């Protein structure tokens, strides 16, 4: 179910398409997050251009994304290790 939605970022409206209710929610939450970060950087760095502010927001989000991906990789590695330990335990339980 493709749904047309409109989000606002930095007082500009952008038409978007969402393929599901979950995707729509994610888009709307992301827009709120971006706008919140824009406002924060504008307060912290008055006089900076919108391009500079958006660059800071993009960098901030990128750094956070890299951190989340790294943590996800660590969790996946830990999960595989635990799965292997459980399988070894179950294989040796009768011995």
Image: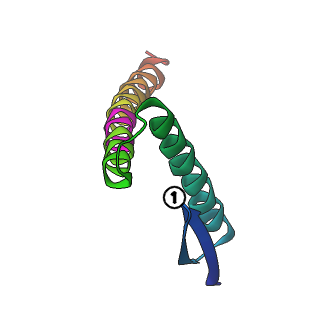
Q: Residue at x 40, y 35 (%)?
A: 68
User: Is residue 91 magenta-colored?
Assistant: no
Please provide percent x and percent y for residue 8: 58, 65
Q: Quadrant of residue 85?
A: top left
Q: Quadrant of residue 95?
A: top left
- Along the line of sight, which residue is nearer the eye, 73 or 14? 14
Circle 1 residue: 10
Q: Quadrant of the N terminus?
A: bottom right
Q: Residue at x 68, y 69 (%)?
A: 21
- Along the line of sight, which residue is nearer the eye, 24 or 73? 24
Q: Residue at x 42, y 26 (%)?
A: 91
Left or right, residue 32 beside residue 87? right
Q: Secondary structure at mark 1?
A: loop
Left or right, residue 95 beside residue 8? left
Q: Residues within 10 Å of mark 1 (few under 14, many from 20)?
A: few
Q: Which residues are magenta?
A: 61-68
């Amino acid at each position: 179910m493709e749904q047309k939605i409109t989000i606002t970022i930095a007082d500009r409206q952008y038409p978007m398409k969402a393929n599901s209710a979950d995707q729509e929610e994610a888009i709307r939450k992301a827009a709120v997050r971006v706008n919140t970060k824009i406002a924060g950087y504008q307060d912290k760095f008055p006089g900076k251009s919108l391009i500079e502010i958006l660059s800071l927001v993009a960098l901030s989000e990128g750094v956070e994304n890299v951190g989340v991906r790294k943590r996800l990789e660590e969790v996946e590695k830990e999960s595989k290790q635990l799965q292997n330990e459980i399988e070894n335990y179950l294989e040796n339980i009768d011995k």
